[in-house]
Image: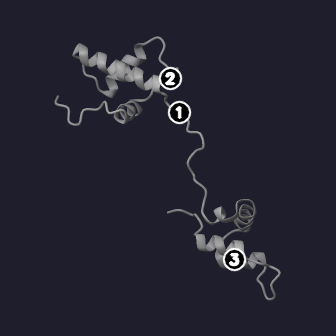
Amino acid sequence: MTNALSPRTRAAIIQYDATQPHALSVSEFCRSLKVSRSVFYKVRSRAVSESTAALHPRSRAPRSPARRYGPEVVNELVRIRKQLKADGWDYGPRTIHYEAALQDAFPGGKIPSVATIARLLSSVGQVDAAPRK
């Protein structure tokens, strides 16, 4: 369940005018909408600076994700996988992680987790659909 305000509530906050006769005070208006005064003023200030964008909540996704792996890391993982396959070893994400940990210098400096290795290999089409063991 989210606590994001609906566009209708945001529109009511944006259109609120305290100068109208018989208008509710800001506190009473906020109480009727069941929002805090700080939320009221945040929506109002965002409406001034961003216009209609204030009707919708901002994205909660991080602006800069903690880790992004470039093509050199993916290429190294694919190289390790192909080498393991050619040598007849298991070439799953765990084995690739182990082999990468044995290297002196891995591109990017940090070895991705086993789950990330699986995700990266899947994104470049290097995963067998149904491998036989």
- The amino acid on which the numbered mark 1 sits, given as a three-letter code, is Arg
Q: Earlier in the sequence, mark 2 or mark 1?
A: 1
Point out the frontmost of discs 3 and 1.
Answer: 1
Check disc 3 and report the residue beneath it. 31
Residue situated furthest top in the rendering: 104
Amino acid under label 3?
Arg
Disc assigned to residue 67 = 1
Q: Residue 52: x, y in percent?
A: 66, 65
Measure the C-alpha gap from mark 2 to mark 1.
10 Å
Badge 1, how many Cα within 10 Å: few under 14, some, many 20+?
Answer: few
For the residues labelled 2 and 1, say whether their Cβ atoms are less than 8 Å apart: yes
Label whose residue precedes the other's in the sequence (2 or 3): 3
Residue 96 quadrant: top left
Q: Secondary structure at mark 1?
A: loop
* 10 Å crowding of disc 3: few (<14), some (14-19), many (20+): few
According to the picture, the residue beneath numbered tag 2 turns out to be 110
Graded by Cα atoms within 10 Å as few (under 14), some (14 to 19) or many (20 or more), the crowding at tag 2 reads few
Amino acid, disc 2: Lys
Q: Quadrant of the C terminus?
A: top left
Q: At 51% across and 33% down in the image, what residue appears?
A: 68
Q: Left or right: 36 with respect to 80?
A: right
> Going by the picture, which residue comes out furthest to the bottom?
22
- The picture places residue 86, in percent across and down from the top left corner, at 24, 15
Sequence-earlier tag: 3 or 1: 3
Which label is found at residue 5? none
Q: Residue at x 77, y 78 (%)?
A: 17
**Residue 109 sits above or below residue 40 on the image:** above
